[in-house]
Image (tube, rainbow, N blue to C red):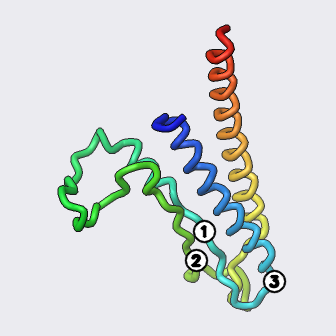
Amino acid sequence: MLGDYTWSVIEKETECLAQRFKAVTRNIANANTPGYARRNVSFEDQMREVMERDKKLHMTVTDAAHIPSHPLRMADVEAAEIKIQDERYRLDLNNVDPEREMAVLSETRMMYTAFMRVAGSKLSMLKSVIAGR
């Protein structure tokens, strides 16, 4: 499985989705905390950039001291937790909307389930190949 692009995507996606689960549950837990600013986890843009890297012309990193302008590999993608402070939902400066957080939680769960199904299908194919069927 080492070097398999599909596995690297599944691994990174599930890792980042797990971080989003934590952020959303933290938001829900602090829905009544005055002054709490909700957190959002972003990683999709980085993943899209890595997947579409062959379609664009990017700077080439020729030395280890160079700073790349984008993630070079799927393993370089990092989920960024962003504190959203410019939105207001209530007068006590808490910006957590429980309905919105539940929608994000449901969307994250569906994405996680879909990736686990893809992983299961891939494992099933590998089992068939190994068994010689």
Left or right for 49, reference 132? left
Q: Quick one: quadrant of the N terminus?
A: top right
What residue would you read off at disc 1?
40
Q: Amino acid at mark 1?
A: Asn
Between tags 1 and 3, which lies in front?
1
Contact between marks 1 and 2 (CB within 8 A): the answer is yes
Q: Please tell me which residue lies in front, 99 or 26.
A: 26
Left or right for 105, reference 15? right
The part of the image, by quadrant, that contains residue 129 is top right
**Could you tell me which residue is drawn at 46 percent across and 52 percent down?**
75
Q: Amino acid at mark 3?
A: Asn
Label disc, if present, on residue 32 of the rendered structure: 3
Looking at the image, residue 96 lies above or below residue 68: below
Looking at the image, residue 58 lies above or below residue 123: below
**Could you tell me which residue is drawn at 36 percent across and 42 percent down?**
52
Estimate the spatial distance between the alpha carbons at disc 2 and disc 3, rounded to whole Å: 16 Å
Contact between marks 1 and 3 (CB within 8 A): the answer is no
In terms of secondary structure, where does tag 1 sit? strand
What residue would you read off at disc 2?
84
Q: Earlier in the sequence, mark 2 or mark 3?
A: 3
**Could you tell me which residue is drawn at 65 percent across and 62 percent down?**
20
Q: Amino acid at mark 2?
A: Ile
